Image (cartoon, helix red, strand yellow):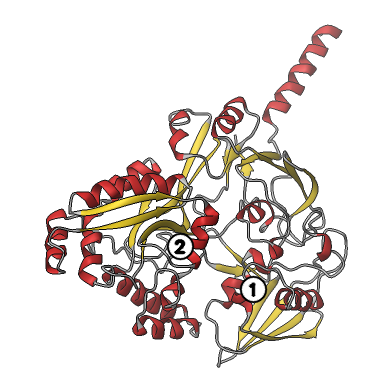
């Protein structure tokens, strides 16, 4: 073989090798830029999208099904009275600045979280913690003031990730955690870059680098995907998904989130204090039409306030099937044969505005005349959520396992049921999974039959990804785009 042929063959081999080599980087488009990068000091979901389980980790970890798994704690025991949790910590863990992780960091984290000047968005969830005691560097004990059946789950939230006293003050701009990826840079208005952390204590992820690009405009996101400038996005606008359907270069992952979308009803205000009126409204709702119009068919119907992907979920969508004749009959029995007029206050999100228009049309057919009032977020938060000045509204409740709001008669929709309050108190004090499931499903059933709110759909998660990527979460049982399982395939 002459020299030129040898060089050509070598070049072909190099090119073939490059083509076969698996990429180890990913570029992810996200709609919102986080205001900061410390999930323990901010409420924005956009923070967790970048750093949760990537840069920061908790004592426990929430998996893709919503189940609690070991995290920085390898195991734990719970006292018989449910008031003492003893955790064994993993050995050999380091923060990304090289400092060691031990029980003192756990104690620091929760004392900071519970401090009087704490800005943690979920501080009330951790108020049952009466004391955190260091037993030795790898043993830490939590003493609770009362049993808390969600304690292990709450330890796995982004709000409770472990931070170090040496770096906590700067985590908003230069986050330092123990996770599989370390923070590299934040080009504000453009991107955040993470790289695989070499001394990571756990299994190494396949990815070596991840770039989160901030793209708020749907058309720009579409073009970036089609041009190959980004490799995927975790939640793409449903109305534009048709662009990628049938395109072999992409895969669409449709799952559900923790966002229960409801026609929230002011239960303390006439005529909504009457069960038959609320039942009539439930029968007047056509979920299929609402889901098609507001989520382009991607929402998951719900019949109670619980996420369909959760193992405790009961399908109660058949409790009040769409039946306009039954709705009119119930209104007449309740003393409203000609229906009634009400206001529907709508926050500035597409799912609410679109659902509102459809529901107004559906209700009109049974005699309920709705005046649609569009509001900005600040006005909605003040008038509806804080001052409870509303008849009806549409909102997605995105907090995980938030059925406890039905046990608070002062909550904005004003439901006051002593049976639910007692069940929820027992649920909160129960740690046995089978018993927790039974109690939660009892509450689900009661609020469905009481038609406390109009249960519409679970907000969908509609991801668009390069077809060669695997390991992304289809559902979103907790906020975040978890990178550890994502990898490229042939």
Quadrant placement of the C terminus? top right
Q: Residues within 10 Å of mark 1 (few under 14, many from 20)?
A: some
Residue 300: x and y in percent read 37, 52
Badge 1 vs badge 2, beta-carbon distance below 8 Å: no
Residue 220: quarter of image = top right
Residue displayed at 66% across by 40% down: 214
Quadrant placement of the N terminus? top right
Residue 251: x and y in percent read 50, 36
Mark 1 element type: helix
Residue placed under numbered mark 1 in the picture: 123
Query: Of 449 and 93, which appears nearest the observer?
Result: 449
Q: Residues within 10 Å of mark 2 (few under 14, many from 20)?
A: many
Q: Earlier in the sequence, mark 1 or mark 2?
A: 1
Asked if 102 appears above or below 202 in the picture, the reply is: below
Residue 349: x and y in percent read 48, 47
Residue 13: x and y in percent read 75, 21
Query: Of 205 and 16, which appears nearest the observer?
Result: 205
Query: Of 345 and 79, which appears nearest the observer?
Result: 345
> Is residue 263 at all visible to an observer of this figure?
no
Residue placed under numbered mark 2 in the picture: 384
């Amino acid at each position: 073989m002459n020299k030129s042929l040898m060089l050509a063959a070598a070049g072909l081999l190099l090119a073939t090798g490059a083509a076969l080599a698996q990429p180890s980087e990913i570029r992810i488009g996200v709609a919102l830029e986080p205001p900061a990068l410390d999930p323990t000091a901010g409420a924005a979901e956009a923070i967790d999208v970048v750093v949760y389980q990537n840069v920061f980790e908790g004592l426990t970890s929430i998996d893709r099904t919503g189940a609690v798994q070991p995290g920085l704690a390898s195991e734990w025991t719970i006292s018989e009275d449910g008031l003492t949790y003893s955790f064994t910590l993993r050995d050999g863990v380091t923060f990304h600045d090289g400092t060691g992780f031990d029980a003192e960091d756990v104690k620091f984290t929760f004392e900071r979280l519970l401090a009087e000047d704490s800005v943690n968005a979920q501080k009330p969830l951790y108020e049952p913690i009466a004391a955190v005691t260091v037993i030795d560097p790898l043993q830490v004990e939590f003493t609770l003031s009362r049993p808390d059946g969600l304690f292990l789950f709450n330890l796995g939230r982004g709000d409770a990730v472990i931070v170090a006293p040496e770096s906590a003050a700067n985590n908003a701009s230069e986050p330092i955690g123990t996770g599989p990826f370390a923070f590299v840079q934040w080009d504000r208005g453009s991107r955040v870059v993470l790289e695989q952390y070499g001394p990571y204590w756990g299994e190494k992820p396949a990815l070596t680098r991840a770039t989160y690009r901030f793209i708020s405009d749907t058309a720009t996101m579409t073009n970036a995907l089609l041009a190959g400038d980004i490799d995927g996005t975790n939640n793409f606008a449903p109305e534009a998904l048709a662009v990628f359907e049938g395109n072999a270069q992409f895969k669409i992952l449709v799952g559900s989130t923790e966002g229960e979308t409801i026609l929230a009803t002011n239960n303390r205000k006439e005529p909504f204090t009457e069960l038959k009126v609320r039942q009539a409204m439930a029968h007047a709702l056509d979920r299929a039409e609402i889901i098609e119009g507001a989520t382009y068919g991607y929402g998951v119907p719900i019949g109670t306030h619980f996420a369909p992907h959760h193992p405790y979920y009961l399908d109660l969508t058949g409790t009040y099937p769409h039946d306009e004749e039954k709705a009119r009959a119930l209104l007449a029995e309740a003393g409203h044969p000609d229906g009634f007029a009400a206001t529907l206050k709508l926050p500035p999100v597409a799912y609410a505005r679109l659902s509102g228009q459809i529901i107004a049309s559906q209700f009109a057919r049974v005699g309920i005349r709705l005046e649609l009032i569009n509001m900005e977020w600040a006005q909605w938060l003040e008038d509806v959520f804080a001052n409870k000045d509303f008849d009806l509204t549409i909102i997605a409740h995105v907090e995980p396992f938030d059925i406890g709001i039905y046990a608070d008669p002062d909550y904005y929709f004003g439901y006051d049921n002593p049976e639910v309050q007692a069940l929820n108190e027992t649920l909160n004090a129960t740690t046995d999974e089978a018993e927790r499931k039974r109690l939660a499903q009892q509450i689900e059933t009661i609020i469905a039959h009481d038609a406390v709110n109009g249960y519409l759909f679970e907000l969908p998660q509609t991801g668009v990804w390069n077809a060669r990527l695997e390991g992304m979460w289809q559902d979103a049982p907790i906020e975040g785009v978890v990178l550890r399982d994502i990898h490229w395939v042939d």
